[in-house]
Amino acid sequence: MKESDITHRLIVGFEIHVQLATRSKLFCGCAVEFGAAPNSRTCPVCLGLPGALPVLNRRAFELSMLTGLAMGCDIAPVTKWDRKSYYYPDLPKNYQISQYDVPLAHGGRFEVPHGDETVSARIIRAHLEEDAGKTLHDTPGCSLVDLNRAGTPLLEIVTEPDISSAEDAHVFCTELHRLVTYLGVSHANMQMGQMRFEPNINVAIEADGREYRTPISEVKNLNSFRSVRRAIEFEYQRQVQDWLADPGYVFKERPNENRGWDDDRGVTVFQRGKEAAHDYRYFPEPDLTQVEVTRADVAEIREGLPELPIPRRRRLIEDCGLSADDAATIVSDRATADLFDGAVRAGGPPSTVSKQFVNFWAKLANDRGVSIGALGVAAARMGALARMVDEGTINATAANRIAERMLESSESPDALADAMGLVAVLDADQTREWVDQVFAANEKAVGDAVSNPKKAKGAVGFLRGQVMKISGGKANPKLAGELIEARLAAPRDD
Ligand code: ZN
Ligand code: MN
């Protein structure tokens, strides 16, 4: 069969592991710490020694509830723990404590506006479990096990297969990552493996008036948004081509697969057939009591929900008049969004504050490899700088230069403008003199503007730029623009 004989549709669901930002592990007091000496952050509980008893980390449970609520899930009034058995050197107990039939959160939905569309997936469940240790294969002749990570709290989020393109998957994962960092439930550093995406991918194929489904492949442990997108694109093509080569099989005739992603080659690689739940011999964990959550507990956690990124973006567009792009930049991380709101509360006009965020604060932050929120400039000072531009005390170029100085100096933007000689000249005579000079030096632009109304607007901008230049940035651009326009309208006066 040829590709032109069939139509096909991609089906993607996700399993996502989020490492919670607790100080200690899920069932013992060991520190959660990346990069410590191997096996130095362990104790009898996370080493799985006989007789050691687990005790639940309350904070991990609360962070999980918070995330569940932010995704619109219901919180189970009673939740329990289960042993998921498998045998692997980095899993000292030979089972993982997880939640099987009663996850702590279920039945939510996460929706992301994307252009004019919405990317949306139902959340089946979110449950808490412990991470395994790490097996290291870089010593010749042997493998080494580091159990520092064993027992680290993970929230596993499982979605319905509602995603239908690699692009949508990318949008969904990016926004879910933003959500957990906004909530402060995870640092979600992807390079450090603190958020791992596992798409479950298959394809519905219509041929001869029938629908076929390819076997589901689960691509394990993707730790960048780019690899999520590329792995899904690759699997989509691979599964369609596999089916075309052997269209005889239907769903379940071939087993589902676990596959790994080879980023260098840009391909997925078969790892093993996928386990079914019965392979894990789940049974209730006898060493932990069940957790009861009252409605008052849920209400209290709900109180702690901050304004979430998506409604926050909408507010900046609708209430502050920001463009969608600018709102996205400002809301990209919580500290930056908080700083924006703080600058506006301190009297900075929203449109000017956002311009300054996008035009120079973002660049200054980028140069230093941090977010705007991490620049260390107080919101009130940012607000004051924006207000000075709005009031015409300084122009936009001067604001940029003052901003650079604000990073090293704790002086007010007012004082810095004074000290740097950047307070705008509002004097009309002085400004007219600069305009005269610019008109004399740029006869062509002036001629164009007069003879061709279509070019007039561009010419005004150009001439104003020249005025700013010869005034050393001290001219008031609004006044200069007005004088230029007036003079272009009556060019024959002189
Ligand atoms: Zn421990
Ligand atoms: Mn898991």
Image (spheres, rainbow, N blue to C red):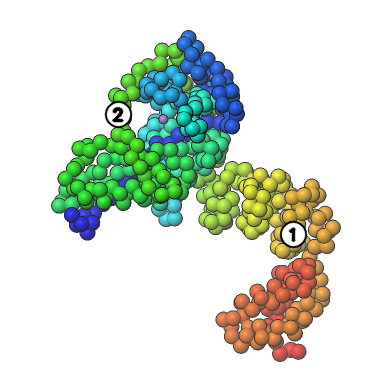
Q: Considering the numbered disc 2 on the image, is that residue within a helix, a strand or a loop?
A: loop
Query: Where does the image place residue 382, in percent across and percent down from the top left?
Result: 71, 51
Residue hosting label 2: 276
Quarter holding residue 75: top left
**Mark 1 to mark 2: distance in Å?**
62 Å
Quadrant in which residue 160 is drawn: top left
Residue at x-position 62% and y-position 85%: 448
The residue labelled by disc 1 is: 401
Q: Residue furthest left?
A: 208
Q: Residue at x 46, y 38 (%)?
A: 196
Q: Mark 1 falls on what kind of element?
A: helix
Q: Is any atom of residue 233 visible in this view?
A: yes
Q: Mark 1, mark 2: which one is toward the viewer?
A: 2
Q: Quadrant of the C terminus?
A: bottom right
Front residue of this view, candidates 420 and 112: 420
**Residue 337 disc label:** none
- Give the position of the N terminus as an image quadrant: bottom left
